[in-house]
Amino acid sequence: MSKVNQILQTAHQRAEQLQLPYSGALLPDEAYELLQSLPKAVLLDVRSHAEWQFVGTVPQAVNIEWRSYPGMVANPNFIAQLTHQVDPEAVLMVMCRSGARSDEVARLAVNSGYSEVYNVLEGFEGDRDGAGHRNSLGGWRQRGLPWVQG
């Protein structure tokens, strides 16, 4: 079994275990591997403009804000922007800060006609550590995957 097929199978198993309505759940390094290996793979970063500007971005990602800072107000044009920028036949991998907003978007994407949708667990910054800080417990940045600041 190829590495890509192994990743997809593991992601599908996680979705079954967690009873998710979308295709699967990926760890950041698995998402990066798929991004490099599958021509139709798209990493969708749904964090806010403030997060992209001040925390960092993934160079290959499509950035569409799901909720705006301050106040985390929902983007009323999200679906229109998504369908304009990402083919519904793409392997869509959704990422946010820690995996919660991306879960919401993954559910919405499935309901909007996207057939292969994955949530990126841990997100860009991962979970909070004992001191309440991010970027030390999982996440895209902590795992050393490509990203840029500002």
Image (spheres, helix red, strand yellow):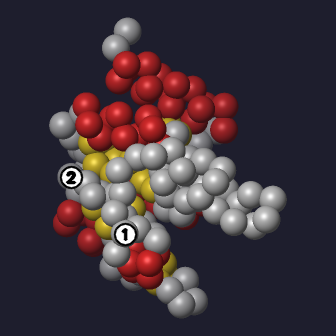
Question: How many C-alpha atoms fall within 10 Å of the one at disc 2: few (<14), some, or many (≥20)?
Answer: some
How far is disc 1 from disc 2 in space, using C-alphas? 27 Å
Q: Position of residue 95 (x, y in %)?
A: 45, 56
Q: Is residue 101 left or right of residue 38?
A: right
Judging depth in this view, the residue of 53 and 106 nearest the camera is: 53
Which residue occupies the extreme bottom position in the image?
A: 70
Q: Which residue is under mark 1? A: 149
Image quarter hosting the N terminus: top left
Q: Residues within 10 Å of mark 1 (few under 14, many from 20)?
A: few
Residue in the picture at 34% in, 63% down: 148
Q: Which mark is residue 87?
A: 2
In this orientation, does residue 92 appear?
Answer: yes
Tell which of 109 and 63 is nearer to you: 63
Q: Earlier in the sequence, mark 1 or mark 2?
A: 2
x, y percentage for residue 125? 55, 59
Label 1 with label 2: CB-CB less than 8 Å: no
